Amino acid sequence: MTNSPIKQAPHPVPSTAAPTDQQLRSPKSSRSLRKLHSAHQLSANYAALNTPSLISQQRQQQQRSTSSAHNNQAPQIPPLPAFSSHHRTRSNSDAIVPNPASNAVATRRAIASKKNPPNQNPREELEGLVRQGPQGDVPTELSRLRHLVLCEGLYADSDGMSQIRIYIWLILLNASAISTDSYLELIRRGASPAYSKIRNDTFRTLATNPLFKRRVSEASLIRLLNAVAWKLHDAKIEKLTEPTMVNAANERGSPELQHASPVIKHAQGPPTTTATDGSEAGGTEPGIYVQGMNVLCAPFLYAARSEAEAFVAFQVFVTKECPGYVRGAMDGVHKGLALVDKCLAIVDPKLSSYLQAKHMKAELYAFASVLTMCACTPPLPEVLQLWDFLFAYGSHLNILCICAQLVIMRETLLTSPSPTKLLRSFPPLQAKLIIEITVSNLRKIPADIYEELVHHAE
């Protein structure tokens, strides 16, 4: 049974006889004429519609010419049918089937170009990376993300607010998502051992910054710092109570390794954390709170869309990126201050010599900038933009960012008889300029000094 277009017509085909005068005079005469004309066209083109397409006939012609090489007979090419002006377009079935391997590659390229069009602007590309995830190799996509952050920056309004910033930070920090209930469980535990010290610091966190005060409440800051203090406290207790291998002698007097009980371990090194202040830990013992963590926490709460997101980012940052900054002795901060002096002597020897002659070491003017990653210097939107760069390429570059701020103040410092007054508070941050100078000075840093930069906060 042929699949005839005529049989699929909603009405039977009218007769091909010429209409009578009575039919022409009827109201439906014009409609009948159109139906007759359509039927004639369908009848004339029916054979053409059921014949092979041009591509198929050409392929048959090629096959016949190949076989004629053996038979020495010229193939009989049937004449091509005359199509009317209303012929159909070529369907996908008429196309030549490509190699499956090349077809898969072409498909992947088409999907990639559809998800990341060539003319896509950086803002849309960043949003696509956050919403859809990496579309290819993860290291390559991370490199692309860092490049976009460095060259294009994140779109934000005049207050520094961006809908994707906290998610970009979480990606760059490699922070795993947690449920809100996990954060609420830490809140329900009540006051941590460092609660009193937290309350003494939170009320003065960015107290002169109206943007921060308008968006972040002190209660939110207390909850987050207290929750992080509980996490650090639990990690410290777990470290102190885990069994270790110690040297002992067996029955025959031979040395062997045995598991030490928590009591033995505490006897070897008692914890120095007091019950009321978790920041008084020893130099090698992990602390749970130090003064300045409130300022370090502030940008996370400002940029995040919820306390749980800020908690995850801040907790990962202080435990993986700069654990040396939150120890009781803050040994990471002091190493960073020494590196400020070293790096400034490399990138600007004249300015460094001048400050050293005035007995102006970094520990006198850069302590807060090192500890808070420059968050202590307004304006807050510039701090967020600078942190985009630090999270993308490493928080250790904050040391070079402090040197860049000194280079910006260079002429003023060299002409001032008392640079101490100028360095009591740094001028407002200029994130783009600081990043440009930092990237330029990075080439001047020797490999051994750069290695110290990378590991100083561990």
Image (cartoon, grey):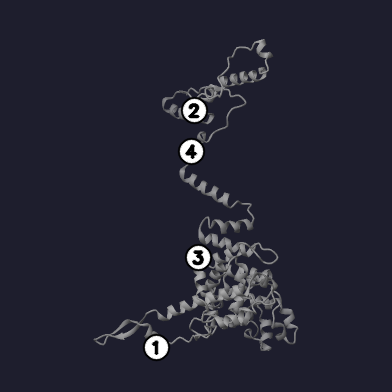
Between marks 2 and 3 in the image, the one whose residue lies nearer the viewer: 3
Residue 179's label in the rendered image is 3
Spot occupied by residue 197 in the image (x, y as percentages of width and height): 57, 83
Q: Mark number for residue 61?
A: 2
Q: How many C-alpha atoms fall within 10 Å of the one at disc 4: few (<14), some, or many (≥20)?
A: few
User: Between disc 1 and disc 2, whose residue precedes?
Assistant: 2
Spatial CA distance of label 4 from label 3 is: 50 Å
* Residue that appears at 43% across and 78% down: 238
Secondary structure at numbered mark 2? helix
Foreground: disc 1 or disc 3? 3
Q: Amino acid at mark 4?
A: Val
Q: Quadrant of the N terminus?
A: top left
Name the residue tied to disc 1: 267
Give the CA separation, mark 1 to mark 3: 38 Å
Place residue 396 in its image quadrant: bottom right
User: Are there few (<14), some (14-19), or many (20+) residues within 10 Å of tag 1?
Assistant: few
Q: Please give the name of the residue rendered at 44% of the width and 28% of the height, measured from the top-left corner.
A: 69
Marks 4 and 3, the one that precedes in the sequence:
4
On screen, residue 92 above or below 76:
below
Mark toward the start of the polypeptide (1 vs 3) = 3
